[in-house]
Amino acid sequence: MTPSEFALLGTLMRGPGRVFPRAVLMDRMQGYQFAGYERTVDSHIKNLRKKISLCLPDQVLIQSVYGIGYKLITAS
């Protein structure tokens, strides 16, 4: 896992069920206000999902929230 992916996962794990906007995830991932594209988060999330699926196949842990960002799915 890259440092960026690790930071994303850590952020999501600190607030399971909470929706994190892309801008917040970028800030937590980079450690400062990043002037780049918020869609960069999408690429990191995609890679993180692939790596998680190697260990936990057939489980979706990170859910996209259309137009907002992402959240970690909590067990029901």
Image (cartoon, rainbow, N blue to C red):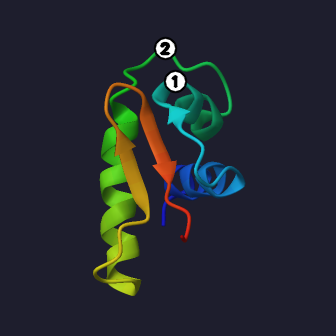
Residue most extreme to the top: 35
Q: Given this view, does label 2 or label 1 mark the residue nearer the observer?
A: 1
Residue at the spot 47% in from the left edge and 30% down from the top edge:
22
Locate residue 49 relative to residue 34 in the image: left or right: left
- Which quarter of the rendered picture does the C terminus lie within? bottom right
Q: Earlier in the sequence, mark 2 or mark 1?
A: 1
Residue at the spot 62% in from the left edge and 19% down from the top edge:
33
Residue most extreme to the right: 14
Q: Is residue 75 above or below residue 37?
A: below
Q: Is residue 22 above or below residue 55?
A: above
Locate residue 22 relative to residue 42 in the image: left or right: right
**Which circle marks residue 23 in the picture?**
1
**Which circle marks residue 61 in the picture?**
none
**Residue 36, quarter of picture:** top left
Q: CA distance from mark 2 to mark 1?
A: 10 Å
Q: Residues within 10 Å of mark 2 (few under 14, many from 20)?
A: few
- Position in image of residue 47 (x %, y %): 33, 58
Amino acid type at circle 1 is Ala
**Which circle marks residue 35 in the picture?**
2
Q: Secondary structure at mark 2?
A: loop
Amino acid type at circle 2 is Ala
